[in-house]
Image (cartoon, rainbow, N blue to C red):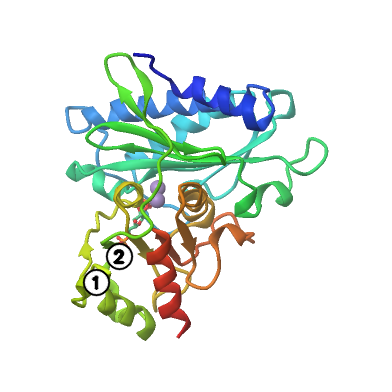
């Protein structure tokens, strides 16, 4: 049986659709190198060493930084900044962008949530890495806001790695969504889920229902609607919430359903970050036939005004996200 690796797959996509410079395949190869290191570290977390737990500091979002957040951030940063394919890197864990010196720079901007769901590491629950790739737009060597604050729809590629019962990479370069599973004996990611399509409707909803008292009435009504009995429309839906966005998203991508992090009294713009979480996953879900919205606006139509901007998020099966939008309108 012929096995396809990620790099072969990206090279093919570049040839067919993107103009074959090989730079995207080469960047993807570096992302995989980082992902393999993190995957191994997570596999042995807890055995000796001093790798679990918090660093005692807080990131720009006010969240407790875990040691593995730092490790993932510095691992991807050092590998990717030397890859010759990017001119700037932004990260959920870094207040400011890292600008690559022009002599080592390439044409892409790389954005990452190095370790998503990191509060789940200590309890052996799946985590992930999310990334997004844009092209440098401004002329000359200088990296400007035109490069760092781009409209979601202008992504060249986006993907995530899920460190779960197996380690998987899922990516899109705008032509389908493709999943690869890490074969630990080979150290290679092998195509296992070609051309993923999200079901048009699911029967799962994923939201932190502990926040109910902070929600607005329309959000409360939508969740009540999903819990009503109505066999014809497949209700009640099942509740599934891991608290690792990558894992919740991955399950819903394969099975169908809706993930939400709505606006609430504590977080009027929701909790998830446009550049590191909502934007890349919106690019993936749309390429799989799904939908992503703030409730009133398509996520990919947003141009952020700040690297760390948050947006309310409704993402998943087309029908389910449209139903949420309908509730939030009325
Ligand atoms: P991160 O670990 O990168 O900070 O992200 C955590 C995010 C996301 O993974 C998850 O869906 C959400 O936070 C969970 O938030 P609540 O605990 O507020 O439900
Ligand atoms: Mn995250
Ligand atoms: Mn994170």
- Kindly identify which residue carries mark 2: 207
From the viewer's perspective, is 31 left or right of 206?
A: right
Image quarter in which the C terminus is found: bottom left
Binning the other alpha carbons within 10 Å of mark 2 as few (below 14), some (14 to 19) or many (20 upward) gives many
- Residue farthest toward the right in the current orientation of the protein: 140
The answer to whether one can see residue 267 in this image is no
| Near-viewer residue (124 or 323) | 323
Do the CB atoms of the residues marked 1 and 2 lie less than 8 Å apart?
no
The answer, for residue 191, to whether it is visible in the render is yes
Disc nearer the start of the sequence (1/2): 2
- The answer to which quarter of the image holds residue 80 is top right
Mark 1 residue's CB less than 8 Å from ligand 1: no
Q: Is residue 24 left or right of residue 92?
A: right
Q: Split into 4 quadrants, where in the image is the N terminus?
A: top left
- What residue do we see at 32% from left, 59% from top? 257
Is residue 18 positioned above or below 158 on the image? above
Q: Secondary structure at mark 2?
A: loop
Residue 267 rendering spot, x and y as whole percentages:
42, 71
Q: Residue at x 49, y 49 (%)?
A: 276
User: Does 211 sit above or below residue 241?
Assistant: below
Residue 232's tag is 1
Q: Is residue 158 above or below residue 25?
A: below
Q: Position of residue 123 (x, y in %)?
A: 18, 45
Left/right placement of residue 260 relative to residue 212 reads: right
**Residue at figure coordinates x 68%, y 24% from the top left:** 104
Is 242 situated left or right of 4 in this image? left
Label 1 to label 2, Cα distance in Å?
A: 23 Å
Depth-wise, is mark 1 or mark 2 nearer the camera?
Answer: 1
Characterize the local packing of mark 1: few (<14), some (14-19) or many (20 or more) Cα atoms within 10 angstroms. Answer: few
């Amino acid at each position: 049986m012929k096995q396809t690796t990620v790099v072969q797959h990206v090279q093919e996509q570049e040839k067919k659709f993107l103009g074959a410079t090989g730079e995207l395949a080469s960047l993807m190869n570096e992302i995989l190198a980082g992902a393999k290191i993190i995957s191994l570290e997570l596999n042995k977390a807890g055995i000796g060493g001093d790798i679990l737990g918090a660093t005692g500091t807080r990131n720009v979002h006010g969240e407790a930084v875990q040691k593995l957040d730092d490790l993932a951030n510095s691992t991807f940063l050092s590998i990717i900044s030397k890859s010759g394919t990017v001119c700037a890197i932004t990260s959920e864990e870094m207040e400011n962008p890292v600008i690559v010196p022009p002599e080592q720079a390439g044409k892409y901007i790389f954005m990452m949530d190095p370790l998503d769901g990191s509060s789940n590491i200590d309890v052996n629950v799946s985590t992930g890495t999310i990334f997004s790739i844009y092209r440098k737009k401004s002329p000359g060597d200088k990296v400007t806001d035109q490069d760092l604050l781009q409209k979601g729809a202008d992504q060249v590629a986006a993907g995530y790695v899920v460190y779960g019962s197996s380690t998987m990479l899922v990516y899109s370069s705008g032509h389908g969504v493709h999943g690869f599973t890490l074969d630990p004996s080979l150290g290679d990611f092998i195509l296992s889920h070609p051309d993923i399509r999200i079901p048009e409707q699911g029967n799962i909803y994923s939201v932190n229902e502990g926040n109910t008292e902070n929600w607005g009435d329309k959000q409360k009504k939508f969740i009540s609607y999903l819990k009503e009995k109505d066999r014809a429309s497949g209700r009640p839906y099942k509740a599934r919430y891991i608290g690792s966005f990558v894992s919740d998203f991955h399950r819903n991508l394969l099975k169908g359903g809706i993930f939400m992090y709505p606006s609430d009294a504590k977080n009027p713009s929701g909790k998830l970050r446009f550049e590191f979480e909502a934007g890349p996953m919106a690019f993936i879900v749309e390429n799989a036939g799904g939908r992503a919205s703030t409730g009133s606006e398509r996520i990919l139509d947003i141009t952020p005004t700040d690297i760390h901007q948050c947006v309310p998020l409704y993402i998943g099966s087309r029908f389910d996200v449209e139903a949420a939008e309908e509730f939030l309108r009325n």
